[in-house]
């Protein structure tokens, strides 16, 4: 049985040990909103495996000289990118479900403004040979 990656199971001392940090550092990161763990009913912090990985990333960035505000912004942007990627995936799936088969009907506006059904790749037949030119208003 696999452990859920987002299940908050580690108390602060265990999470600190896994991230190779002091528990007080984790409390500071929580206060600053850098890594915010879940809370157990007794208000104690509970960290998930994802939180521990994030703590390791914070430590790596910190060792590279990035400030805590910079780290917080980087994590926010990474979360935003991940959310946008999920949304793109959802929209792509929805679009794939809505794709029409090649033999589906196409509708267009006829020359008289009526709606006509066409085969794919065909254009509506003009009722007269008069050329209809559309110009946006204000360019007359």
Image (tube, rainbow, N blue to C red):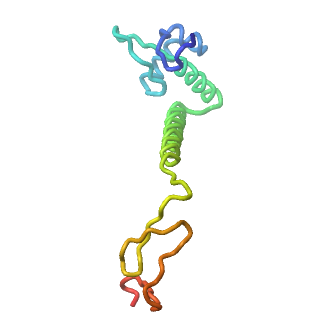
Q: Is residue 123 above or below residue 33?
A: below
Q: Is residue 124 above or below residue 117?
A: below
| Tag count | 0
Q: Position of residue 9 (x, y in %)?
A: 48, 11
Tell me which residue sits at (36%, 75%) in the image.
114
Q: Most extreme residue toward the right, as rendered?
A: 64
Tell me which residue sits at (49%, 14%) in the image.
24
Direction from residue 96 to residue 133 in the image, left or right: left
Quarter of the picture containing the N terminus is: top right
Q: Position of residue 126 (x, y in %)?
A: 46, 83
Where, by quadrant of the figure, is residue 112 drawn? Answer: bottom left
Q: Is residue 40 above or below residue 127?
A: above
Where, by quadrant of the figure, is residue 109 drawn? Answer: bottom left
Tell me which residue sits at (56%, 69%) in the image.
121
Q: Position of residue 78 (x, y in %)?
A: 54, 37
Q: Position of residue 23 (x, y in %)?
A: 51, 12
Direction from residue 91 to residue 62 in the image, left or right: right
Q: Is residue 19 above or below residue 122?
A: above
Direction from residue 125 to residue 20 in the image, left or right: right
Quarter of the picture containing the C terminus is: bottom left
Tell me which residue sits at (44%, 66%) in the image.
107
């Amino acid at each position: 049985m696999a452990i859920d990656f987002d299940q908050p199971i580690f108390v602060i001392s265990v999470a600190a040990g896994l991230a190779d940090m002091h528990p007080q550092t984790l409390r500071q990161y929580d206060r600053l909103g850098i890594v915010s763990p879940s809370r157990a009913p007794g208000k104690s912090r509970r960290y998930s495996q994802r939180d521990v990985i994030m703590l390791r990333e914070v430590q790596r960035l910190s060792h590279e000289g990035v400030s805590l505000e910079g780290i917080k912004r980087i994590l926010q942007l990474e979360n935003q990118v991940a959310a946008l990627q999920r949304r793109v995936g959802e929209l792509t799936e929805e679009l794939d479900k809505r794709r029409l088969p090649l033999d589906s009907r196409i509708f267009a506006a006829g020359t008289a403004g009526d709606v006509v059904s066409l085969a794919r790749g065909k254009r509506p037949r003009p009722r007269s040979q008069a050329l209809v030119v559309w110009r946006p208003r204000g360019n007359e």
